Amino acid sequence: MKSTMQDGPLLISNIVRHGEFVYADKKVFTVTPEGVDEATFFEISKRAEQLAAALTKLGVARGDRVATFMWNNQAHMEAYLAVPSMGAVLHTLNIRLFPDQLAYIINHAGDGVIIVDASLAPLLARVRDQIPTVTTIILHGDDPTGVLGDTLDYDDLVDAEGPGFTWPELDERDAAIMCYTSGTTGDPKGVVYSHRSTWLHSMASTSANSIGFCEKDRCLLIVPMFHANAWGCMFTAFFAGVELIMPQMFLQGAPIITMIRELRPTISLGVPTIWNDVLRVAEETPDTDMSSLRGIVAGGSAVPRGMIETFREVYGIDMIQGWGMTETSPLAAVSIPPAGTAREREIEYRVKAGRVVAGVELRVTAEDGTVLPRDGTSVGEFEIRGPWITGSYFGVDDPQKFHHGWLRTGDIGTLDAEGYMVVSDRAKDVIKSGGEWISSVELEVTMMAHPAVFEAAVIAVPDPKWQERPLCCVVVRSDAAASAQELRDFLAERVVKWWLPERWTFLEAIPKTSVGKFDKKALRTQFAEGELEVVVVN
């Protein structure tokens, strides 16, 4: 027996139409060196139509790749709406990649058009002669240097067209957006999101059991729009009427605090390293006002317990830890305590990686592929599947990454009966000492609870007796001091004895990846080449 319910494709253009009609007066705020620019959803929707018309005249057809090399701003959002809605594929380029990786991604994707912010033109110019598939570069803003050669002006192109572009009827499984992994192990890999997966992901993020985006919200979007599809926020905004604050290049603690005070967001998305800097500046700024925030969503790496406690106890803000990957669109788990949890016990859930969201399935497997029990103690690799989880990479055969229809995440940890996951490490970062695992993540978040520690990263280093042992890399706060012995004693009260690092190194800053995570690959290289001054404490 078949139903007689109406059926239609789940398309990004439907989300655009909904936002334009229902939330026409909602606003997007773009922070600039001169002040704050504002535009309504209706205005942005119409400019997206004009951009689509202009791209069509340039010869962009269904399935063609249009890349962006841009900050978080209004024009970037217009491209987010226009390109997939017209049937082309939006490819967001990571502005912080090394030139060889950037050229590789552009060529591998087959990008034909790139829209670039003028302030980023010198970065793109480094690879201009290495990207033969690119026929057209559209420049947003003024660049008197002309380093990119012949370009078209973004505003001139858009302003020359009238609104009213008719969005085509597409297959909901058509490619809509593509994003490449950060390439910390080997070449970056392309993940392609469909209209259907993007639509379902947007709906999931509005659930009160996940992030709970709704029209009461104004979101400060710190996470870059090239990082895992901006965590889906562009489309969730039009889906649910969420206003957006776009910070462009102003991603340091001081300007972020100013944005929070003056533009009054209710929620904000960013990686923990950003929030660590916000807390540092807030401590030095007596008039810090973050009272508008109902919550902060942090992801990309583990959130230290001390950070969660400080935001709640000092500023009255709940931190929501999210877990996901480029391959998962990225929303997969969110650390919201279960109903009825006493306030003093909520921290026990907020420090976990998250609780699996409806729509995806999660499991833990042993090295031999055996599915482990959801008991909160059995440690293995997380595998995941669902309608917004990738089933393969673009143009790359990587069967080792997929296990009978499940994506192997590379994250190691436990899953309990309530669906909460605890990530103890990345498979490539786990420390195997004497045949037993040591969690670098747990050591890091515990170490960052020390009042003198600003940042801490832990890597595995060779050991003649135990095969591997942890090396703790520490950045001490500028107004504090701490010795290796003092920090080891602090850890001794909080972790098992055999986990305690003997090797310590103190740095001015921990290297970061292009998306703001600790770059442990760089730290391992520095150690191997003898560039780190290591102190041994037993």
Image (cartoon, grey):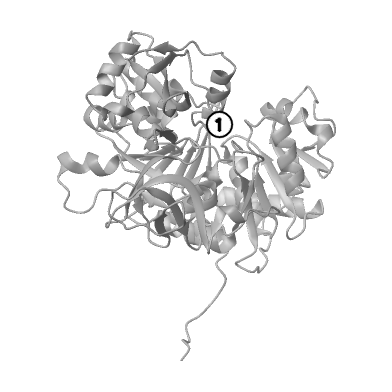
**Residue 331 visible in this rendered orientation of the protein:** yes
Quick check: 98 left or right of 495?
right
Residue at which label 1 appears: 248
Above-or-below relation of 174 to 66: below
- Quadrant assignment, res 307: top left
- Quadrant assignment, res 299: top left
In terms of secondary structure, where does tag 1 sit?
loop
> Which x, y percent locates residue 280?
36, 19
Q: Residue furthest front?
A: 465
> Which x, y percent locates residue 138?
75, 39
Above-or-below relation of 534 to 388: above
Relative to the observer, which residue lies in front, 56 or 42? 56
User: Which residue is found at the position 72% from the left and 29% from the top?
Assistant: 121
Classed neighbour count for the residue bearing mark 1: other residues with Cα under 10 Å, few (<14), some (14–19), many (≥20): some
> Which x, y percent locates residue 339?
20, 54
> Which x, y percent locates residue 273?
44, 28
